[in-house]
Image (cartoon, grey):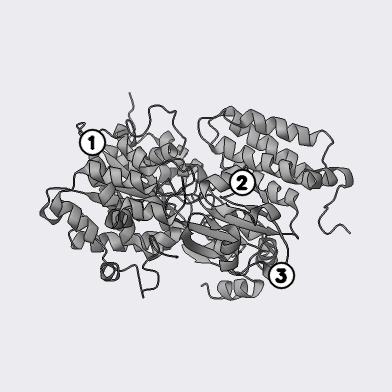
Amino acid sequence: MSTSVVKDVTELFNPEVRAEIDRWVAKYPPEWKQSAVMAALRIVQDDNGGWLTTDLMNDVAAYLDMPAIAVYEVATFYSMYELKPVGKHKVCVCTNVSCMINNADTIVEHLEKRLGITFGEVTEDGKFSLKEVECLGACGGAPMMQVGKQYYENLTPEIVDAILEGLE
Amino acid sequence: MANEVCLRTLDLERPWLLEQYQSRGGYEILKKVLTEKTPPDEIIEEVKKSGLRGRGGAGFPTGLKWSFISRNAPGQKFVVCNSDEGEPGTFKDRDIIRYNPHQLIEGMILAGYAIGATRGYNYIRGEFWEPYERFEHALEEARKAGYLGENLLGSGFDFELHSHLGAGAYICGEETALLESVEGKKGQPRYKPPFPAHFGLYGCPTITNNTESLASIPMILEKGGEWFSDIGVKNSGGSKLFSISGNINNPGVFEIPMGTPFSKLLEMAGGMKDGRKIKAVIPGGSSAPVIPGDQMMELTMDYDAIAGAGSMLGSGAVVVLDDTNCMVKVLDRMSYFYHEESCGQCTPCREGTGWLYRVVHRIETGQGRQEDLDLLDDVAGKISGKTICALGDAAAMPVQGMLRHFRDEFQYHIDHKRCMVGAG
């Protein structure tokens, strides 16, 4: 028998995060709150500077009435969840075939040189992190990358510079 | 003849708005079906007649899939749209959602009506934030106009539709992995049978169709199955969206009749960049075996022609490679992808994709061994057909295709520890 204090789930997260998760919960049958776990993890991750802590995952589990392990499974399975800190701007570069044959490697080299980091790393000031991603479905604009929610296509080193300079 | 079905509003300004869609007769066929109470079987027959085959890549006849649902069985049923576009080279569904979201919504409502489902989900890949916002906006407009919700246009038919966002997993494009994902789980494919038509989302009868398939439905019902079928050729009804990319001048999405010569599509896409020679084409997404350029120039873009050349039309994702490309490097990248994206459930795929990648990678980096090509053939053969879903086959097919057509390039890499391309 557990004597640990059960958290009051209505106290979890801030009201905006809670409202946004609730909006997703409402899309699914009442007995399938778990369907909102992917959205909940994304919302919580965004609210936490782009990454998930074990505590946050546990809170999501409690909020959606799921076993914590089921939440960890989801968080580790999908590539858009981050389990370590990332930069304020997560720069995701596609290196799959269409981008590769349109000089994605030049874009990667340029980013690595400019930011002084490689894939999986964060700049010292915490502003940028770099991530290699699989095809993002924008091959007509190869080479391409995604920063935050935004796609940037037909990249050249000069365009990459302009994009990075435009980010706060 | 181009842009007749899914991209027919593309010439309009802000074509994603309801009023623009309606200015081209949008939602008229839905109104007609709801007011005339068209028998659902008639709708399914019309879709069968159209020759529409699943546009996500598998090419399964859409009307036949719908007919597997027992419409009168009690309980909830679902329509699920697969907008998890992830097959490398494919970027057409993104354009449908961005530019013509209402036609997809109308198609999903009609599908729901035909199979007796009152709820639907559109599974949009998580990276597609802009298309997702477009779709959400269109849902709002449709709801306000009375096309979604209860008792649509006084017909007594209810239909509610939501989007579900993915979070980065190629495997969720497999229909049962996608259903698992909607249920809030890891996207691991289910054993079949039971098929989703009997045991789908939340254990209920479900049809899952690709974005392009569902967005084609309103035009098929408005103009008739025969009209659609006649656009294409035998066994390949209709037009199709081709995503063409690679070493070409004008990459993009082209909606053209099935059976159009590849040479014509290449011409539409601006031809080869820098006047270079075409070396090879991956005709249907990276899972489709490669076809040498010369052979491809003689083929037409339809299921039978591409299958006849030992490959597949797949999702209509055409990657054009010029003669500066090293095929070992291309396969190295593709094999990495399948290894990275294997869900880990079946041993032949989980381990085999790693073997394929490591062996191709060592050939690419000058560490290849004489026995490696036979080893690749062997491993690929031992993955094919031995896994729950098609990801294993999708990993094996590009390897087999490359070895079939470009074996000498791989052998050169092993013998000389460098590339044949530009080796002079």
Q: Earlier in the sequence, mark 1 or mark 2?
A: 1
Compute the Cα span from label 3 to label 1: 55 Å
Q: Is residue B220 above or below residue A63?
A: below
Name the residue located 34 percent from the left edge and 61 percent from the top edge: B101
- Comparing B228 with B376, the one in front is B228
Element type at marker 1? loop
What amino acid type should be assigned to the residue bearing mark 2?
Phe
Q: Which residue is mark 2?
A: B337
Q: Which residue is mark 3?
A: B275
What amino acid type should be assigned to the residue bearing mark 1?
Arg
* Residue B69 visible in rendering: yes
Compute the Cα span from label 1 to label 2: 40 Å
- The subunit carrying tag 3 is B
Residue B401: name its quadrant: top right
Q: Position of residue B274 (x, y in %)?
A: 71, 71
Q: Nearer the viewer, mark 3 or mark 2?
A: 3
| Tag 1 and tag 2, C-beta contact below 8 Å | no
Name the residue located 59 percent from the left edge and 51 percent from the top edge: B283
Q: Position of residue B372 (x, y in %)?
A: 79, 35
Q: Position of residue B317 (x, y in %)?
A: 54, 54
Q: Earlier in the sequence, mark 3 or mark 1?
A: 1
Q: Is residue A91 above or below residue B338?
A: below
- Comparing A61 with B367, the one in front is B367
Q: Which residue is mark 1?
A: B71
* Residue A145 visible in rendering: no
- The subunit carrying tag 1 is B
What amino acid type should be assigned to the residue bearing mark 3?
Gly
Compute the Cα span from label 3 to label 2: 30 Å
